Image (cartoon, helix red, strand yellow):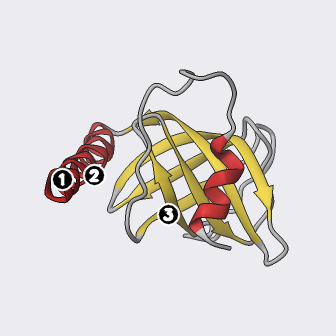
Amino acid sequence: MGHGALAEVFQRSGPEGRRIGRRVAPLDLWIAWRPVPAAGRKRRRRRNGSTRDARVLDLSVSGALVLVQGGEVLTPGSPVEIELDGDVGLCRIRRSQVHPDGLVAYGVQFASLDPRLTSRIADLVADDRRVLDERWRTAR
């Protein structure tokens, strides 16, 4: 399923102005994705046992659209730990859509990020803006 089709699923998200940040589509950005077990559930302490790679399709300073292969389908409100090059953060599932090929698209909201991860995300969003501005000026 293409990026456009998945992004369209999450495009309609309520009244205009609800989003606090613009979204960008980073090229080939992958994060580690670790669902956090619900309170009272025992967690197996296997190293990387529940860690999956997730592709980031859309990114903003407040959340992301990610695509994950397989695993238990998470419900809205479920916490997930994410990691990018050693920088860790916690996010919450806001939306999910299961696809027949086993992929699950999740809309997540960032809840708590390491300062370095917050900075990296802000840089990715800002860098994309500079690239778009430059392309627009060149096209004129």
Please name the residue that numbered disc 2 is placed on.
128
Image position, residue 36 (x, y; %): 66, 48
* Mark number displayed over residue 32: 3
Instruction: Please give the name of the residue rendered at 75% of the width and 68% of the height, measured from the top-left corner.
Output: 71
Q: Which of 123 and 90 is in front in this view?
A: 123
Name the residue at the front extreme.
140
Q: Which residue does the numbered mark 1 point to in the structure image?
A: 140
Above-or-below relation of 21 to 60: above
Residue 74 appears left or right of 107: right
Question: Does residue 83 appear to the left or right of 6 in the view shown?
Answer: left
| SS for callout 1 | loop
| Front residue of this view, candidates 115 and 14 | 14
Q: Within 10 angstroms of label 1, few (less than 14), some, or many (20 or more) residues?
A: few
Mark 2 lies on a secondary structure that is helix
Label 3 CA crowd tier, 10 Å (few <14, some 14–19, many 20+): many
Query: With 137 as the anchor, is 81 left or right in this view?
Result: right
Q: What residue type is labelled 3?
A: Ala
How many other residues sit within 10 Å of disc 2, few (<14), some (14-19) or many (≥20)? Answer: some
